[in-house]
Image: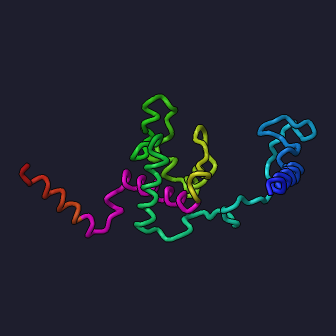
Amino acid sequence: MSRLRFWSVVTVLLVLSGCQQEMTNQPRYEAYEKANQWPGNQSARRPVEGTVARGEPLGPVPQTLPFELTPSLLQTGRERFEIYCTPCHGMTGYGNGMVVQRGFPKPPSFHSERLRNLPLRHFYNVISEGFGVMYDYSARVPPEERWAIAAYIRALQLSQHARPEDLTKAQRARLQAQGSGKQGAAP
């Protein structure tokens, strides 16, 4: 019985030793390795024109917010802004985040005239592709959340540059009543 077991184990070992992992041992390039047969001697190649990454939309990026602006969307935008954007841009978007206070280059204020006049798609594109020293966040932030962040940036801009003439008469009256109530109230 033990002889049979011995020869069974030997047979199994011989069969398994014949297996090869040729796919793991095939010729390949390591990241950024030089490749003389390719243009520019680069092994890393650009994707073929028209290639769409998995999970990305197939159509063109819309010029405006592709879905309804809701309080929930703005809340999502605020949460993602606080996670990804405040280290550089600060809580209010003036470009005074914590990393800037520690010597990192200051990003432009979202409240500059130039950025206030740009369409939402600009902010979506910057989040997607990066700009200047800001790297892209496309791997970290899905497209729907990029739009939510862009909408929240616009809300930040409007909060800092609201004009009384933008309000309805009822809103102005309520604002004036609140202002006069605070002045007459005792501390």
Res 22 visible: no
Q: Residue furthest right?
A: 37
165 magenta-colored: yes
Q: Is residue 96 above or below residue 59?
A: above
Image quadrant assignment for residue 181 = bottom left
Q: Is residue 107 above or below residue 128?
A: above
**Residue displayed at 88% across by 45% down:** 26
Where residue 92 sits: x, y (%)? 39, 47
Dominant secondary structure, magenta:
helix
168 magenta-colored: yes
**Residue displayed at 55% across by 62% down:** 144
Q: Nearer the viewer, residue 186 or 6?
A: 6
Q: Nearer the viewer, residue 159 or 169?
A: 159
Image quadrant assignment for residue 166 = bottom left
Where residue 88 sits: x, y (%)? 47, 40
**Residue displayed at 62% across by 64% down:** 62
Res 7 visible: yes
Which range is magenta?
Answer: 143-172
Where residue 17 sits: x, y (%)? 86, 48
In this picture, residue 6 sits left or right of residue 185? right
Q: Nearer the viewer, residue 139 or 22?
A: 22
Q: Residue furthest left?
A: 186
